[in-house]
Image (spheres, helix red, strand yellow):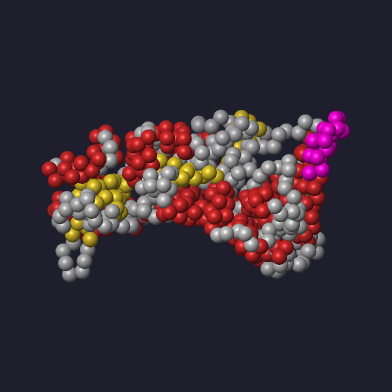
Amino acid sequence: MSLTPTFLDELRARTSLSTLISKTTKLTKAGREYKGCCPFHNEKTPSFYVNDDKGFYHCFGCSAHGDAIRWMTDQRGLPFIDAVKELAQAAGMDMPAPDKRAAERAEKANSLHDVMAAAAEWFRQQLDGIEGGPARALLDKRGISDATRRTFGFGFAPDARGKLRSALKQFGDAMLIEAGLLISVEGKEPYDRFRGRLMIPIRDARGRVIAFGGRIIGDGEPKYLNSPDTPLFDKGRTLYNLDRALPAARKADRVLVVEGYMDAIALAQAGIGEVVAPLGTALTEHQLERLWRIVDVPTLCLDGDNAGQKAAIRAAHRAMPLLAPGRSLQFVTLPEGQDPDDLVRAKGAGAFEALVGEATPLVDRLWSHEVAAEPLTTPEQRAGFRARMAELAKTIGDPVVRSEYQAEFRRRYDEQFGQTRRPFERGRSFEPRQPFTPRRPGQKWTPPPLPVTDDAKAFRAAGIDRVLAKAVLAGLIRHPAEIARHMEVLGSLRMADGALGRLFEAVVDVALEDRELDSARLVTILRNSGFEAVARDLLRADTMPYSFTQPMGDASRAREDLDEAIAILVTQPEVDAALADATSAMQARFTDEAFQRQVALVKEKQALELRLANLVQSNEDARAFDSEDD
């Protein structure tokens, strides 16, 4: 069917977002908006806002953002088309009539689902038959109960080239080949793909069979054989057991990732249902994004052998560009020579839970891997190590998370190698941030404690540096593709009143509606919306000497500097408020601890000011923490 932008806009307009969200999340009225505790991460202080007028929700804690359709896909876990259908039914709208080609694709998909369902039932019958004896013996040896066997739909493919083809001949060879059940060789008869294997159905998020995994009975290679990619099955986007794991994961607020089907099945049989597995490949970006839609910090439970540890590092590196505030990974390493299946059968679920309870955060796994990669006894080796860690931190797309990783890597380097004050990145203080211990990636974000003094409250209310906010806003208008990456700024700029705040809201609204927007078109829209004067003044190149506010120049440099400016903009109010609070506390009662805290905060504030000053400079200072060697 053709879902036009007009239809989707009308659907959003007819849907009361606050009513939809309040069905599962408690909301209270807050001016023109609604607020509540975010359903996407655990929090005690509400930072989740719903705006019916603009039709979107946003969490200032974890940056969850979207409209009614996004709510249905992310929070409810529905596929896009199912989300649209459910919202349309509630809004009393008829779904658009399918076009001819879409109807043909839908009909083919439905037919392929029928083929896969029939194949799964046939494999199941073979497992119960005479020829299925060896497969049943294998299940018994692995400790798989009859109930688990039925729940996961185990089957058996006889060691013959044409039995499945004959049994499902009503579908025709072409459809069986397209479903991945037959292999076609030019000039020869098609033959069964799966032969002499224990069959494990692979289902989509709705529980429909879309592929199979086959384990060899006895000796032979490959040990496991998956269906090829088909119109129903994309190996890089599919997670085994997702349909059963989703409800358990939402209840347990966690999801565990293991290496294979049998690990997931064994854990489910032991009472741990929130488990998924990739399908014979390293985790892909698509699979990581799907996991993050379930929980903020998925737990990867990988074997303790060399292959398992390599898979852990591949997953860690692949996740780095995708990290966001509160969104990370953690790792469980099993004893060498054991997988989750072995462990729960030998020692029970409690032993596995104990390992999960000691999961290692992503930053720890990255650090320990690089430290162990080679000797670090000479200055040259340590310089190489610093360079690797700097490059690794640079791969993080989110500027705030990137800044936290750079600071954390610097702190760990100082602790481990006893270095004194050195520049970490352009203009930043090299001393540890005493009052602001970096959060471990994946740790839930919580707002800083409310200020207890009038001075601190005044700083918090004043919020952002308006001059810097104007520069950042000009930079976002110059580079609108960066807006979606920097939604965390919304929390700070919402505090700005007057024309600046209104202009920022207009910029964000326009950019969110059109992700392909360029600067010229954005400026035109702003002018037509009554912002001509303020936008013109904001974009005068001679008023703000930053690379990201200029119409010409190095685009890569401009984006990097804009990242840095945004990080400073977000951090400044917190540092100012904490400094005001510390100053008042020391004035009320002088102690050495209070004095040291005030001194540390003053240095933190000076470091921020120096970072901002360096953005004005034209020299190409190195930004990584090994820049002092240049």
Count of numbered badges drawn on the protein:
0
Q: Nearer the viewer, residue 133 or 606?
A: 133
Whether residue 158 sits left or right of residue 38 in the image: it is: left
Q: Nearer the viewer, residue 109 or 524?
A: 109
Q: Which image quarter holds the C terminus?
A: bottom right
Where's residue 262, x and y in %? 33, 44
Whether residue 221 sits left or right of residue 605 in the image: it is: left
Whether residue 69 sits left or right of residue 145 in the image: it is: right
Residue depicted at x 73% and y 51% = 568
**Does residue 149 appear anywhere in the picture?**
yes
The quadrant holding residue 438 is: top right
Magenta residues (range):
579-600
Whether residue 584 sits left or right of residue 204 in the image: it is: right
262 in the magenta segment: no
Query: What residue occupies the far front of the structure in this picture?
Result: 377
Where's residue 170, x and y in %? 16, 52
